[in-house]
Amino acid sequence: MYLSTVRLLAKFPIMSSWTLRKLKGLPLNYSNNNLEYTENIAYMMFAKPNQDYNQNDIIVNALNTLLILHADHEQNCSTSTVRIVGSSYAGLYASISAGISALWGRLHGGANQAVIEMLELIKNDGSDIEKYINKAKDKSDPFRLMGFGHRVYKNFDPRAKIIKEAADQVLNDLGIEDPILEIAKSIEEKALNDEYFIEKKLYPNVDFYSGIIYRALGIPTEMFTVMFALGRIPGWIAQWKEMRDSKIQLEDQGRYIMVQHIDQFHRLNGYQIRYFNFSFKFLEKILIS
C-alpha cells in the first residue's frame, strides 16, 4: 500500500506534465531533484528547451494553491467512486482509475472547462456581456452562467476567495492581454453587483477562477480535468486508506417497492415507473421517458 501511494504521488505529476508538453509539441522534461513538489511540476510543465528556467514564485504559489484546494472536498462523485470500488478490496490503482473515470464527467471534473467554453461562446458572439447576463437571468432561456453557484455552498465558496486572489496575482504578474480573460473579469464584476445574483446567492465558484488561472498559464482546456485529478489524487488516496483501515464496507443498494395492483402508476424520484404484480409478486420496473 505504501509503495503504491508513493508511486502514484510521484508519477502522476510526471505523466500530467508530459501530457501537456505533448499537446504543445515540446520535448519531454524530466524532474529536478533539487526542486520541491509544486516547483517540480511547474518546471516539468513550463521549462523551454535550450533556455534557462527561471522559477516564477507567483505561478508556483498559484499551482500550489490549486492543488491544495482541490485535494479533497466532501463525498463528491469521484471520491465516492474511489471508496465504493475500494470497498470491494480492489487495489489502489484500480480505485484511483475509477475515480478518474468519474472525474471525466462534465458536471464534475469538466466544470472549469465549461467556464472557458462559455467565455469563448460569448467572445465569438461579439463579447456582449450584458446580453448573456440577461440570458442567465431569464428562466425560459436554457443558457446558464457556468462557474457561478454551488450545490453545497449557498454563499461565497470559501475556496473561491482564495483562488481569486491567486488568479489576480497571476494576471497582474503575467500582464496577459487575452479577450477571454477580460470577458471573465467583466462577468465577475457585473454579476457580483447584480441584484438578481446577489438575491439568488450565485457567486463565482472555484471552477470559475481555476479555469482562468489555467488559461493564463497556457494550459489548454482539454488538460483542465488532468489538473483537477493531479490535485485530487492525495485526497482520494487518503479516503481510500481511511476506508480500508477502518474496514468499513460501502454498498449501493437499490430499494424495491412492491405494489398490489396491475398497471398502477406512480411517480418516484422524478420518473414515471410502471409496476406489474404477478402471482409470485414479481416486480418489473420500466422507465417511461
Image (tube, grey):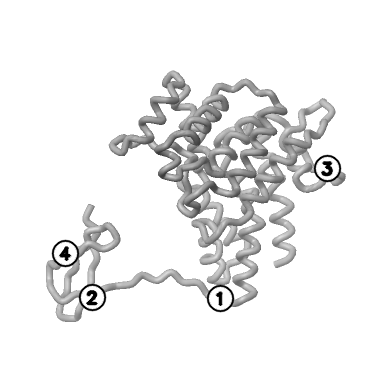
Q: CA distance from mark 2 to mark 3?
A: 63 Å
Q: Within 10 angstroms of label 2, few (less than 14), some, or many (20 or more) residues?
A: few
* Amino acid type assigned to the residue bearing label 3 in the image: Asn
Between residues 145 and 280, which one lies in front from this camera angle? 145
- Residue marked by disc 2: 258
In the displayed orientation, state which residue is furthest to the left.
262
Q: Earlier in the sequence, mark 4 or mark 2?
A: 2
Find disc 1 in the rendering and name its residue.
248
Residue 50 seen: yes
Q: Which quarter of the figure is the N terminus placed in?
A: bottom right
Measured along the vertical axis of the image, is residue 54 above or below residue 124?
A: below
Q: Position of residue 271 (x, y in %)?
A: 26, 58
Q: Residue at x 72, y 57 (%)?
A: 7
What residue does disc 3 label? Answer: 32
Label 3: few (<14), some or many (≥20) within 10 Å? few
**Disc 4 marks which residue?**
265
Mark 3 / mark 1, whichever is N-terminal: 3
Q: Residue furthest bottom?
A: 280
In this view, the residue in front, 155 or 178, is 155
Decide if residue 106 is in sight here: no
Q: CA distance from mark 3 to mark 1?
A: 40 Å
Q: Earlier in the sequence, mark 1 or mark 4?
A: 1
Say which amino acid is labelled 4: Phe
Q: Secondary structure at mark 1?
A: loop
Give me the C-alpha separation between circle 3 and circle 4. 65 Å
Which is nearer the N-term, disc 2 or disc 1?
1
